[in-house]
């Protein structure tokens, strides 16, 4: 596992999310949406924050030319072991330079939410705009801070709950992960403090932070960075966005 982070270590990351049986990543519910968008707008496709290839690989297996960018050596190493069909590139989604433009650039699975500062978000959007073909589409999937989510963050703040149980990728039993949440209202930062109980080791504690982008906020951010929102969905089944939607899935075009 990574000395810097358990959560972002590739083997740990995949095992952790596979253990969250209620979570869409274990069932890859979003893959059909990215396949649909690639069929409509690709090929080739650029995916930002590709991780271990959870969505990039199915697109490549469906015949699309896919480039995946990620900043993590661990994630890319694991992704390369999974598939040689994707062009895996190490890079920062806020500052990358490729020699081509794409008809479709995707940013799946709430990855944009890890950009905590406005400057990071705007740098990412500038890179996306630079790498889009004329008329190309940018599809982004963000967490929607819907009322129930915010209520849970406030009322469960500091309370430790069971998150998931999964096999230790290093062997030697299972890891029990519990978590507690906090929310910084001023900066719109939600922190999930993860506690890992690993057999034979001291408990490991790690903070995962995301920024909550509210619906009108993200649309204004896109507008003032040169994008026009063409459609907005609330889930991977294609239903319209509502205030109670878990996701904000926006398909945009540079303008």
Image (spheres, helix red, strand yellow):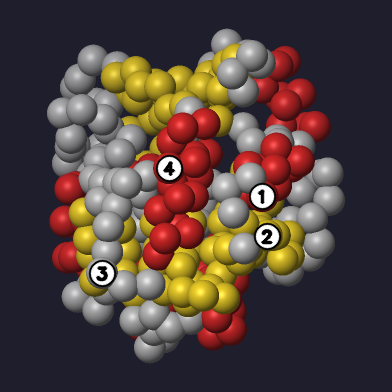
The reply to whether dot 1 and dot 2 touch (C-beta < 8 Å) is yes
Spatial CA distance of label 3 from label 4 is 18 Å
Spatial CA distance of label 4 from label 1 is 14 Å
Query: Could you tell me which quadrant the C terminus lies in?
Result: bottom right
> Which residue position is annotated with label 1?
223
Spatial CA distance of label 2 from label 4 is 17 Å
Tell me which label, 3 or 2, sits earlier in the chain.
3
* Quarter residue 175 falls in: top left
> Which residue position is annotated with label 3?
99
Spatial CA distance of label 3 from label 1 is 26 Å
Element type at mark 1: helix
* Quarter residue 249 falls in: bottom right
> Which residue position is annotated with label 2?
228
Compared with 38, 99 (above or below) is above
Compared with 102, 69 (above or below) is above
Image point 81% across, 62% down: which residue?
Answer: 240
Query: Could you tell me which quadrant the N terminus lies in?
Result: top left
49 and 97: which one is in front?
97
Label of residue 202 in the image:
none
Q: Position of residue 80 (x, y in %)?
A: 18, 65
The reply to whether dot 3 and dot 4 touch (C-beta < 8 Å) is no
Q: Where is residue 73 in the image (x, y as percent from the top left)?
A: 17, 48
Image point 40% across, 53% down: which residue?
Answer: 127
Image point 38% across, 72% down: which residue?
Answer: 101
């Amino acid at each position: 596992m990574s000395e810097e982070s358990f959560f972002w270590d590739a083997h740990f990351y995949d095992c952790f999310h596979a253990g969250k049986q209620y979570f869409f990543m274990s069932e890859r519910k979003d893959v059909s949406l990215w396949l649909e968008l690639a069929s409509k707008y690709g090929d080739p496709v650029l995916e930002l924050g590709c991780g271990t290839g959870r969505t990039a690989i199915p697109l490549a297996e469906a015949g699309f030319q896919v480039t995946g960018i990620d900043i993590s050596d661990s994630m890319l190493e694991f992704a390369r072991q999974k598939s040689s069909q994707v062009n895996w590139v190490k890079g920062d989604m806020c500052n990358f330079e490729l020699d081509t433009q794409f008809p479709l650039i995707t940013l799946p699975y709430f990855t944009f939410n890890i950009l905590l500062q406005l400057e990071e978000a705007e740098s990412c959007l500038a890179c996306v705009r630079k790498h889009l073909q004329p008329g190309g589409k940018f599809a982004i999937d963000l967490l929607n801070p819907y009322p129930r989510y915010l209520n849970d963050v406030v009322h469960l703040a500091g309370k430790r709950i069971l998150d998931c149980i999964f096999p230790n990728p290093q062997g030697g039993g299972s890891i029990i992960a519990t978590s507690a949440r906090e929310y910084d209202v001023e900066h719109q930062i939600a922190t999930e403090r993860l506690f890992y109980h690993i057999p034979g080791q001291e408990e490991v504690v790690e903070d995962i932070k995301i920024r909550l982008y509210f619906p009108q906020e993200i649309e204004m951010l896109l507008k003032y960075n040169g994008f026009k929102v063409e459609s907005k969905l609330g889930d991977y089944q294609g239903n319209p966005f509502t205030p109670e939607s878990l996701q904000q899935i926006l398909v945009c075009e540079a303008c």
